[in-house]
Amino acid sequence: MEQLIEQLKEAGAGTVLIQEPLAEYTTWKIGGPADILVIPETKEELIAAVKLLSAQGLSWTNLGRGSNMLVSDKGIRGVVIKPGKGLDYVRFEGNQAYAGAAYSFIKLSVLAGKEGLTGLEFAGGIPGTVGGAVYMNAGAHGSDVSRIFKSADIVLGSGELVRFGLDEMQFSYRHSFLHDTPGVVVEAVFELQPGDRKEIAAAMASYKDRRLRTQPLKMATCGSVFRNPPEDHAARLIQEAGLKGFQIGGAQVSELHANFIVNTGQASAEDVLTLMSHIKRTVQERFGVELVPEVLVVGER
């Protein structure tokens, strides 16, 4: 491990942290330490990190803002890569938005609206990064990343930098090819359309008002925990099963939105996992529907 740490530093892979607690890097505020956390600030540092790990046959875990991730209490063995502030940028060229992997998806939607560009209104409440949004094909309000996606620069597991278009991303509901093939998004390009600034602002204000009324935005959550079943909503099923407010340890089904699990203050990953299992079992028994987690569970159990 010490040799790998020195090699990462010598390769110019970015900031290298050892036994770094990950709870503060996730929106759930849950998670044990990473053996090694690498924070590359540039495309070149990211490529250097991945090439070194690839050459040694080592895998890694990709971490964005941690808004759709549950890190186990024991943490993550091996290397975690988190794009740093140098990849936190955006620029607009005509109707296109070029955003770095570490840029806030919410902030991108707000700035696009101010530019008079429509298409990103749905993203105003998705608390992740651009890289995470592309990875998950994040969506809300009847739209998702695939509707506005043009291309992305991605560092593949080999360390090769490639540019993928819409078809190559293989987007489907909360899924992209990155679920099956190791890779890290460096930059994404979104194709937007000219729109009326007042209409865009009004739509985003309406969405925000709805979120404030229906989601526990002031508490530590990961967003939606389960995917919506075909022609239905996970929140409806969980609520109809009588689970709103149900709590295990420090993890509780939100009183506002049944598909959110909140950290009431001292929740462990095991609390969340046990609660998720209880929700799945209860909904299955009550309605015959198997809920599929949307949240990514990572780390040593």
Image (cartoon, rainbow, N blue to C red):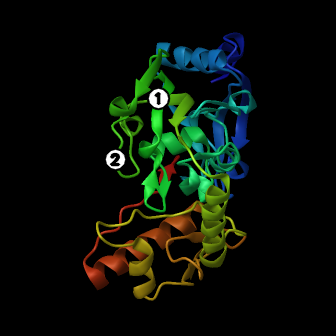
**Number of disc labels:** 2
Q: Amino acid at mark 2?
A: Ser
Can you give x and y, in whole percent of width and height, for residue 68 in the image? 55, 53
Can you give x and y, in whole percent of width and height, for residue 6 in the image? 70, 16
Mark number, residue 172: 2
Question: Extreme front residue here?
Answer: 196
Q: Amino acid at mark 1?
A: Ser
Can you give x and y, in whole percent of width and height, for residue 43 in the image? 63, 19
Mark number, residue 61: none
Vertical arrangement, residue 220 with respect to residue 298, above or below:
below
Vertical arrangement, residue 33 with respect to residue 216, above or below:
above
* Residue 207 located left or right of residue 57: right
Q: Note whether residue 72 is visible.
A: no
Q: Residues within 10 Å of mark 1 (few under 14, many from 20)?
A: many
* Labels 1 and 2: the sequence-earlier one: 1
Can you give x and y, in whole percent of width and height, for residue 121 in the image? 57, 54
Nearer to the camera, 115 or 101: 115
| Residue 89: quadrant of the picture | top right
| Residue 34: quadrant of the picture | top right
- Circle 1 sits on which residue? 151
* Residue 86 located left or right of residue 66: right
CB-based contact (under 8 Å), mark 1 and mark 2 = no
Q: Residue at x 56, y 38 (%)?
A: 131
Q: Secondary structure at mark 2?
A: loop
Q: Nearer the viewer, mark 1 or mark 2?
A: 1
Q: Note whether residue 270 is visible.
A: yes
Q: Residue at x 50, y 25 (%)?
A: 154
Vertical arrangement, residue 203 with respect to residue 184, above or below:
below
Marks 1/2: CA–CA distance: 16 Å
User: Which quadrant does the N terminus fall into?
Assistant: top right
Nearer to the camera, 186 or 20: 186
Q: Secondary structure at mark 1?
A: strand
